[in-house]
Image: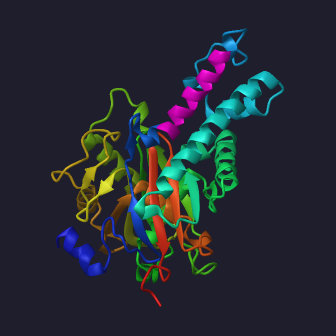
Amino acid sequence: MNQNITIREAGIAHAAQRLPSVVVDDYNIELKDGDGFIGDRVSKAAFRTMLEACRERLHAIGPDPLGDKPSCDFTKRRLDHILLGQDPLASGAVFSAIEAFAQELARVVRIFLNQEGWRGTQAIVVGGGFRDSRAGCLAIGRAGFLLRGEGIDITLEPIRHHPDEGGLIGAVHLAPAWIFSGYDSLLAVDIGGSNIRAGVVTTNLRKAPDLSRSAVWRSELWRHRDEDPAPSRDEAIERLIGMLNDLIRRAERANLTLAPFIGIGCPGVIAADGTIARGGQNLPGDWEGDDFNLAGRITAAIPRIGGHTTMVVMHNDAVVQGLSEVPDRKDVTRWGVLTIGTGLGNARFTNRGDEPGCD
């Protein structure tokens, strides 16, 4: 049976606006002004540029307290070590970059809040690789303070799960509730501009029917950005399929009952048929356009899981990472997610039952 027909008959769809727990009001906004894309100002690279600028000011009147290594070569762990270290000037340089980034992040949030699809937002969680550091969390907290200090009633805080896990855990909220009957886990994929991660997520429904105890049981990571030469699209897909088959075998050996469902988070605008309309420029090879369908390729390679027909559902990666927060956002009606990495991912949600017109 055609994969798209299978998905429609099952009551699920790629890039659906209405999901089981939330309505996706907007996602993957690409805002520009005279200086270019707004999101470029709050990327991981932007933070390194800000740090380099702070160091240049110090270097103009004396030695650089951070040494000779370029800012782009500092790992997150090394920056956190400097931040909490014994050299006050070196720590001050990192703190100065954090302050500059926080100011820019607060400005970007204000711009988003003025967009039609983001009006009325009550809370924003920040994920992506930048959140996985002390410096990143401090910048997020400082930006939240700046916004509230201006009288903007919004909560801005780091995403609860580690971003590597949130991008997988969110996949459970792509699936309709009926698919979990008789199953305790599912496969999830998080595709990014630097790496591809696949994992088995256990739902733990007996402990928490709202999926708040969902967890990554096992995952595999492939950093395609480190490959030389760069892999082709077909090579990347074969690698991903191999990762999924390995996870299926591991789950079977562990007596997990995998649902015949694979949830995928992928950069860009995802069309209803599972193709990537735009935004996949950082992926290995050409993933955009009607001539390539990732969901179809995976379904053809893994047609059945546990004896049942495999269903694959794709959505934007920021949407999926944001969905990992669903159980923790019941105290608000409208909330969003920003993911800070090689670029700025974004999505805004309204909790189901709270959208206009619902009783």
85 up-or-down from 353: above or below: above
342 up-or-down from 4: above or below: above
Q: Residue furthest bottom?
A: 359
Can you see residue 189? yes
239 horizontally vs 80: left or right: left
Quadrant position of residue 357: bottom left
287 up-or-down from 252: above or below: above
325 up-or-down from 282: above or below: below
Q: Residue furthest right?
A: 86
Q: Position of residue 123 (x, y in %)?
A: 59, 63
For the residue pair 91 and 172, the one nearer the viewer reads as 91
Image point 53% across, 36% down: which residue?
44
38 horizontally vs 158: left or right: left
Q: Position of residue 291 (x, y in %)?
A: 15, 51
Image point 60% across, 81% down: which residue?
206
Can you see residue 212? no
Q: What stretch of residues is rendered in magenta? A: 41-57
Position of the N terminus, as image quadrant, is: bottom left
Quadrant position of residue 28: bottom left
Image point 28% across, 41% down: which residue?
235
Q: Position of residue 358 (x, y in %)?
A: 45, 87
**Membership of 51 in magenta stretch:** yes
Q: What's the colour scheme?
A: rainbow
311 horizontally vs 342: left or right: left
Query: How many badges with numbers are in the image?
Result: 0
For the residue pair 166 and 254, the one nearer the viewer reads as 166
**Membership of 43 in magenta stretch:** yes
Query: For the stretch drawn in magenta, what is the main secondary structure?
Result: helix
Q: Position of residue 266 (x, y in %)?
A: 37, 53
Image point 39% across, 31% down: which residue?
227
